[in-house]
Image (tube, rainbow, N blue to C red):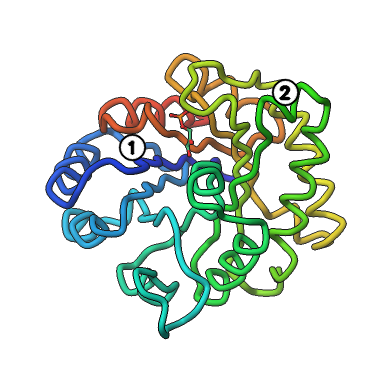
Amino acid sequence: MKKLLIANWKMHYGPIKAGAWIRAFRRERLPKDVDIAVAVPFVSLAAARASLGRASIPALAAQNVFWAEEGAFTGEISPSMLKEFGTEYCLVGHSERRAHLGETDEMVQKKAAALQKAGIIPVICVGETEAQRKRGEANKVVRAQVQAAITDLKMDGKVPVAIAYEPVWAIGSGKPCTAQEAKQMHEVIRVVLQKKLGAGADEIRIIYGGSVDLRNVSEYVTTTGIDGCLVGGASLDPRNFGLLCRAANPA
Ligand code: 13P
């Protein structure tokens, strides 16, 4: 399975800076054996697409979506609208959305299913808080998040899905989860996927996110069971993200 590296800009870069980032990133020497995507704010999707021109790397990702196709949902964006921009991936249930916008497991479940139906790969984000880990509840919490999120997903000929394990305490903290801790949680997640989706579950990439940087990226991607990384802060500089992508190249 090819490794997957996704840049998550979060709430950074409007259209002008997004276009400049894409052009600068395209000047990097990009590895062929890594799938690369960039999750940009909605308003910057058009500029990112325009700067890409005919190029398909990095693939475009959105950071959120609504589950209905259209209707009276002021301020929301549907999967087919994202598809019009050639969006290939979409993050769902990022812990920042769960924390600040009240996103629940049920919403994550509906969003993931709607994305898959529209042919966009949902990247389902899960992860425990520091308090939950301290109480010894990390596995239980993450298992429940994954179980809920995949309830309506199908593996028969549909676009694949991906899971991003992002322990909340490791996000933006400079305190990354060790590769061994991540590996252990990825195994827990893999079992949940296998129980629900059978053999098809092995096609699902489980990537790690939380303070990934140039010093630790190669350790994650060379650890069995870690299929890539979701990168926040270290992706804001296109050069730096280019270096991360090269470091993730198996060759
Ligand atoms: P940092 O890489 O800045 O810790 O952010 C991780 C993240 O939340 C990516 O989605």
Residue ID at (31%, 52%): 41
Residue 180, compared with residue 128, is above or below; it is above
Q: Residue 21 at what x, y percent from top left?
A: 20, 40
Characterize the local packing of mark 2: few (<14), some (14-19) or many (20 or more) Cα atoms within 10 angstroms: few
Q: Is residue 7 left or right of residue 230?
A: left
Q: Is residue 48 left or right of residue 178?
A: left
Kind of element beneath mark 1? loop
Label 2 vs label 1: CA separation? Answer: 29 Å
Residue ID at (17%, 52%): 15
Kind of element beneath mark 2? helix
Instruction: Give the amino acid type for the residue marked by disc 2 in the picture.
Output: Glu
Give the residue number, with chain letter if any, for mark 2.
181
Residue ID at (61%, 39%): 227
Instruction: Give the amino acid type for the residue marked by disc 1 in the picture.
Output: Leu
Query: 204 or 39, which lies in front?
Result: 39
Q: Earlier in the sequence, mark 2 or mark 1?
A: 1
Q: Residue furthest right?
A: 195
Q: Is residue 210 left or right of residue 143?
A: left
Q: Which mark is residue 30?
A: 1
Answer with the quarter of the image where residue 175 lies: top right
Q: Residue 96 at what x, y percent from top left?
A: 49, 42
Residue ID at (67%, 63%): 106
Name the front one of labels 2 and 1: 2
Q: Which mark is residue 172?
A: none
